Image: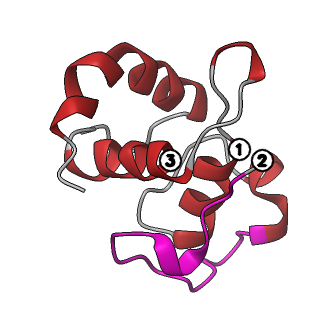
Amino acid sequence: MPAIKRSELRYEYSWKVSEGDNPKLIADDAHHLSRNEGYEMLLYLNSLTGKDGVDLSVKTRLIVEWMLKEHFKSTAPGRQTVTAWVVDNWSRLSPHYPG
C-alpha cells in the first residue's frame, strides 16, 4: 500500500497528543476525525481504500487531505460521515486539486 509519510502531508498539523487521546488506538480512541491532529489524519488517509478494496495512490490520498482541509466544514465529523462526504464529493472536487 502506498502510504503517505508525515513529510508528504501538505498542511500543518499538531503532533502533540491531546489529553485522553492515544495515537496508537486511533480507531478505538475516537469516533470522530480531528483534522488538526497529524497522527489522526495520517492514519485516516492511509486507511482509505477505493472501491472493492483497491489500493489508493499517494496522490489520491493527498487529494483527500486537500478536500478535507479546504472544503469539509463539519466541526466534529464522524469517520463514516467523512468517508461518505469524500465519496459524494470526489467527482466535483478532485479535478480542482491544485497539487
Local crowd size for mark 1, using a 10 Å CA cut-off: few (<14), some (14–19), many (≥20): few
Towards the viewer: 23 or 71: 71
Local crowd size for mark 2, using a 10 Å CA cut-off: few (<14), some (14–19), many (≥20): some
Q: Which residues are magenta?
A: 2-23
Towards the viewer: 12 or 53: 53
Tell me whether circle 1 and circle 3 mark residues in contact (CB < 8 Å). no
Residue underneath mark 3: 61
Q: CA distance from mark 1 to mark 3?
A: 10 Å
Q: Quadrant of residue 52?
A: top right
Residue underneath mark 2: 27
Q: Give the secondary structure at mark 1.
A: helix
Mark 2 or mark 3, which is nearer to you? 3
Q: Give the secondary structure at mark 3.
A: helix
- Amino acid type, residue under disc 2 in the picture: Ala
Q: CA distance from mark 2 to mark 3?
A: 18 Å
Mark 1 or mark 2, which is nearer to you? 1
The earlier-in-sequence mark between 2 and 3 is: 2
Mark 1 or mark 3, which is nearer to you? 3
Residue underneath mark 1: 47
Percent position of residue 74, x then y: 31, 37
Percent position of residue 11, x then y: 33, 71
Tell me whether circle 2 and circle 3 mark residues in contact (CB < 8 Å). no
Tell me whether circle 1 and circle 2 mark residues in contact (CB < 8 Å). yes
